[in-house]
Image (cartoon, rainbow, N blue to C red):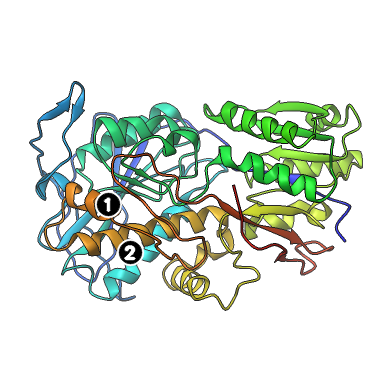
Amino acid sequence: MFGERIAIVFITASLLLGGGLGYAVVADYNATKNLKNTATAGSTVTTDLGPSAEPSAAASAATGGATATVNAAKPGQVALATSQAASGVSHDQIVVGGIFDMTGPVDSSVERDTVRAYFNKVNAAGGINGRKLVLTYCDSQYDNVQTHQCSNEMVSAHVLSVVGWTAPKGENDEVKFLAQQEQIPIIGGLGTPEEFNYPLSYPVSTSFTRAGPGLADELSMNGFKHPSIIYINDVPWIQPVLQAILDSLHARGIHEASVEPAASTDQDYTGHVNNLQQGGPDSLIAALDPFSYARLFSAMNRVGWHPPVIGAGLDKGNQQHAYSTQLEHAQSLVPFLSPYDHQNNATVVDYLNTVQRYYPQQVPALDIYTQIAWSAAQVFVEAVKRAGANLTRASLVQALNSIQNFDTGWSRPLSYSANTPHDPNRCYTYVKHDPTTYDQGGTWHTYTDWKCF
C-alpha cells in the first residue's frame, strides 16, 4: 500500500531570463520557399527550419506582408476575420501561432516540438486541402511583458489560431487580449482560470481551479486530514487556484497545517521545508513545476522529512531521476491516460512514435503538459478539416463549435459550442508510483477509473 508518500502538485513554471524577444517561423514540409518576416522594434527574428516531412529536406515559410482589413465589432475589439489573407491562409499554407517559455530552467520547447511533430505528421500525409501547416512561435521567457510582445507578434503574423501554447506566467493574462480583443481562437493551454472565460478559447485539459475537488477527493480516499501546502506565488493566476483547493479541502473536513509561498527563482528550499513541517502535517501539497520539485525534494531529503506526496507534473522523464526516494509511492491526478501504463493505447503509440521520429531529443522531456499540446493539435486539425477549403478564422470557429464528443483517445470526449465559455474536460484518473525510485525502474500505474468534477 502507499502510505509513505503523497505530494499534491499542479503546474506553474520556473525562471525568468531577460533579453530580446525570440521569434521564429517554422514550416515542416518538403519544399523550400523564400522567407519574408517583419520584426517588431526591438525583437530578434530568427528562422528555425526544423525537420521536414521527409528527413532529407527542410522548408520555411511565412505569410509575410499579409494585411488584415477588419472593422471593429465593439470599441477596442476587431471583428472575427472572414478573409483568408487576414487569417494566415494562402493557397498552400496555414500559419499557426505558438507562444512558449523557452529560456531558463523551465523549457517549454518540448510543448512547441510536440505541436510541430503533430503538424509534421499531417504535412507528411499531404497536409489539409492541399495546404501545409506552418508554426510561427515566440519565446515568452516566463515574463508578462515578453508574453504580451509575443501576442502582438501573433497579431502581426495574422495567425489563424494559437495552438498548444505553454507560457505559465503570462498565458492567463493574454487570453482576453487574443481571444476577445483580437478575435484569434486559442486552442489548448495549461488550464489557467481565464482560459475558461471566453468563447474563442478552446481548452482541452481541466482547469487548475477544478483540481481542487480532485485533490481533496484523492486525499480523502487515503485518509489524510492535515496537509501542509507549498505553492509558487509569482504567477498572477495562482490565488484563485489556491483558494479553490482550500475550499475543496475544507468541504471534505481537511484542514491545512501551513501554507508556504515560494518563488520560482528560489534555489534553496530548506527554509520552506522547515516552515512546512510546522503544525505536524500528515501530508504535503506542493504547487510547483517539474523543475522545482528537485530543489524541494532535495531539501526534504537533507532534513530527513518524507511526508506522503501527491502530484501532477511529476512524470517528466528527464527530471524524475532527481526526485530520489520522494517519488516512491507518490500519487497524482491526471486528465489524460498515462503513457507509462497505457503503452498499447493508439493515441499513446502515435504520440510517442511521432515525437520520436521528428524530435527524438525531446522524448525524455514528455509529460502531462505535452499531452495537452498534442491534444490541442488534434482538436485544431479536426476543426481545420471540418472548415473545408474556405478556411478563415470565422470558418474555423464555426467548425470548432460544431465539435461534439471528440475522442482524443486518451481523455474523456471533448465538446464545444458557440457563444459560451468552454469547459470540456472535467475528469481525472489517479496514478501512483512504484515503491522504488525512477532510477531503479519505478514507474506510474493508474489505480482508478475516470473521476469527474
Q: Which of marks 1 and 2 is nearer the N terminus?
A: 1
For the residue pair 29 and 219, the one nearer the viewer reads as 219
| Residue 341 image point, x, y percent | 65, 71
| Drawn side of residue 20 relative to residue 363, left or right | left
Tell me how far mark 1 sits from mark 2, CA to CA.
10 Å
Residue at 79% from the left image edge and 64% from the top image edge = 434
| Location of residue 441 in the rendering, given as x and y in whole percent from the top left corner | 77, 69
Secondary structure of the residue carrying tag 1 is: strand
Task: Give above or below for 78 relative to 323.
Answer: above
Residue 311 percent coordinates (x, y):
70, 48
Residue 96's disc is 1
| Residue designated by label 2 | 119
Q: Which of 103 and 239 is in front in this view?
A: 239
Q: Which amino acid does label 1 sit on?
A: Val
> Does the residue at mark 1 contact the one at mark 2 (Cβ under 8 Å)?
yes
Q: Which residue lies furthest to the top in this view?
A: 75
Q: In which quarter of the image is residue 92?
A: bottom left
Quarter of the figure that contains the N terminus: bottom right
Please indicate whether residue 150 sits to the left or right of residue 87 in the image: right
Res. 329 in view: yes
Find residue 116 and report its horizontal and vertical position in percent: 37, 60
Q: Which of 147 and 260 is in front in this view?
A: 260
